Amino acid sequence: MIWVLRRLVLAPALVVITALLWISLPLWIIGAAALSPVIPGRWRALRLFWVAFLYLTAESLLLLVLLGLWLASGFGWKIRSPYFAGIHYDLVQFTLVGFFREARRVLALRIRTDGPAPDRHPERPILVCCRHAGPGDSFTLMYALLHWYGREPRVVLKDTLAWDPAIDVILRRIPASFISPDPGAGEDLESQIGALAAGLDTNDAFVIFPEGGNFTPARRERAIGRLHKLGLHQMAHRAERMTHVLAPRPGGFLAALDAAPHADVVMVAHTGLDHLLTVADLWRELPMDKTLVMRWWEVPRAEIPEGRDERIEWLYGWWEQIDAWVEDNRPVA
């Protein structure tokens, strides 16, 4: 029933709303421009409206193209074949590049990368383990992997993102997995993640966010409480000392390590927009000049321990390092 709602109600409704916005676009622009002088910030209302309008337009065009690809594949018969998967990756890259270029221009957003980023001409797959915080970090990471580094991502995302119609359709056609950070009884998420990470090609990048959700103070407290409840008091005390990240949930990442024994690991952290936790934060801060800093660390496979307990200790050590990096690179208010 939920699938029907997303595909047959939300997706067409989004296309119709976007068409209505195009028809009435001059009125929306005039209204946003009229509000801008009375709202703090440089043309805040107009800039936010333009980015939202671009996003809806990109989503609607994607949905129409995806429908065309479904028809061209024989009503979905060959939609998951390597040929059509390559088309979908190219389509995602083209859309992200176009949207990001315009959004960065309008929002005056700069992206800086530090550290050894993935090789543009890869010879082996990578497992990308990323801090999860702030709006759009998943999109920014996909943009970087596809456009800058020539990788084809396989991504593990929260199931709530499936309510975005275009994301829902695309990630059902290329290797990806929607999971719940709080699975129900009988759900073997580690097996799902391991299956997704198996058989990576040299240009693939398996992407996972071990924290299971965006960082918020409340989620941090719940993560610490969960560790205490499980009797993992030492890990809980270590999590208490990390103030900018959530305690990682190692199960999925360890399953990916086992399923991709030849893959190196790339750790990714970012800062610059991570203090935007509410809609009010987004309205107040997002259009202003910002710099998003992405830090990459390459970890050769030989440096990763073999035992499960040793790998959990190793992952916590990396998360402590990421927490320290965020502390040293927080944006100055």
Image: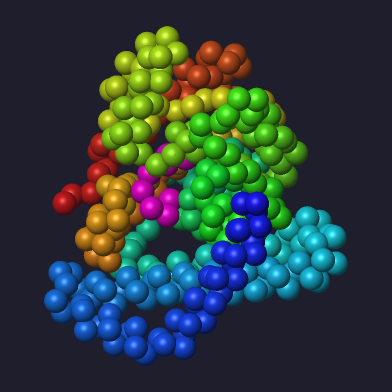
294 within the magenta span:
no
Q: Is residue 99 above or below residue 137?
A: below
Q: Residue at x 53, y 13 (%)?
A: 309
Q: Is residue 30 left or right of residue 172?
A: left
Quarter of the image for residue 163 reads bottom right
Q: Residue at x 61, y 17 (%)?
A: 306
How is the rendered protein coloured?
rainbow
Q: Residue at x 42, y 75 (%)?
A: 53
Q: Is residue 250 above or below residue 111?
A: above
Q: Nearer the viewer, residue 267 or 118?
A: 267
Q: Nearer the viewer, residue 228 or 260?
A: 228
Q: Which contiguous range is marked in magenta?
A: 129-137
Q: Residue 217's x, y, as percent? A: 28, 35
Q: Nearer the viewer, residue 28 or 117?
A: 28
For the question of whether residue 148 can be seen, the reply is no
Name the chief secondary structure element in magenta. loop
Q: Is residue 281 above or below residue 327?
A: below
Q: Residue at x 60, y 34 (%)?
A: 264
Q: Residue 102's x, y, as percent? A: 42, 73
Q: Is residue 221 left or right of residue 155?
A: left
Q: Is residue 95 above or below residue 207?
A: below
Q: Residue 46's x, y, as percent? A: 29, 77
Q: Residue furthest front?
A: 1
Q: Residue 307's x, y, as percent? A: 59, 14
For the question of whether residue 186 can be seen, the reply is yes
